[in-house]
Amino acid sequence: MPEELSLAASTTGARPADEGARGRFDRIYQTLRRRICLLDYAPDERLREEDLAEEFGVSRTPVRRVLVKLEAEGLLRSVHGVGTIVTDIEVGALAQVYELRVELAELVGKLSPVPVDDALKARFREIRQRCDSMVRKSDPREFARINMEFFHLFNSLTSNEPLRLVSERLYYQTTRIWLKTASRLREYEQLLNNEFVIFQREVADITEAVEQGDLVAAGHVRRAHISMSFSRIRQASESGTRRDDKPTGSAPPAHA
């Protein structure tokens, strides 16, 4: 299934008429993963097989297989006597994952790069325009959605399948942390607006590199932004923790 259709299906959970067993699995998997990463399912929320099977119009078998895969990827955990629970996310526990993501981002531009044609350039220009609109709206959830789509688009710059698969798994392990941090700092509008503008700049710079056919440069840009993003997330998380320990009215340092 093309990435555009895959992402659209994961948004709605719609069931294609010609869907087979593999299609059912992918549809449910992508939908649940997306919901977890957009915090539609909150950390520690229980997911019931029977409820999901009814929602997706399938037996419990494909649902169970999806839950097992999401557990293996660190997004769910099984608790004896309770069931399947959405995992929580903490910045400190993700440091090594981010370190590896930084290195892999650069490899996307080097290993088995895909040909840069007009269609690929158009896809980058389109998401750049949507990113510009997102900045004007200042909506953290829209930011998270576009960030996911941009990840898949960037990841498509390499045809190295093992690299794509590992990069995708690590991305979905970490992507919730920004939205969770933003939800704790929603009152600090400037911090959030800074993140929107920084992401807008990243998309613009990578789009320019793709327009020039320089995928190595695109990888360097992505690498730098992932590294800086984690530094800002860690600072924001530490600021939020300090704020929780202070009297009401205290604000974190005004850094991005």
Image (tube, grey):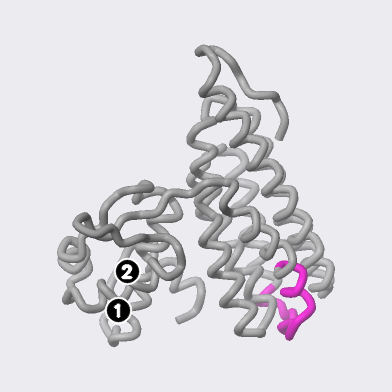
* Tag of residue 24: 1
Inter-mark Cα distance, 2 to 1? 13 Å
* Residue 198 position by quadrant: top right
In the image, taking residue 148 as reference, residue 106 lies left or right, namely right
In the image, taking residue 73 as reference, residue 67 lies left or right, namely left
Tell me which amino acid carries mark 2: Leu
The reply to whether discs 2 and 1 touch (Cβ–Cβ < 8 Å) is no
Q: Write the residue at 72% across / 74% down.
A: 108
Q: Write the residue at 43% across / 49% down.
A: 88
- Which of discs 2 and 1 lies nearer the camera? The answer is 2
Tell me which amino acid carries mark 1: Arg
Q: Quadrant of the C terminus?
A: top right
Q: Write the residue at 42% across / 70% down.
A: 72
In the image, is residue 129 above or below residue 50?
A: above
> Which is nearer the N-term, disc 2 or disc 1?
1
Residue 180's spot in the image, x, y percent?
49, 42
Which residue is tagged 2?
67
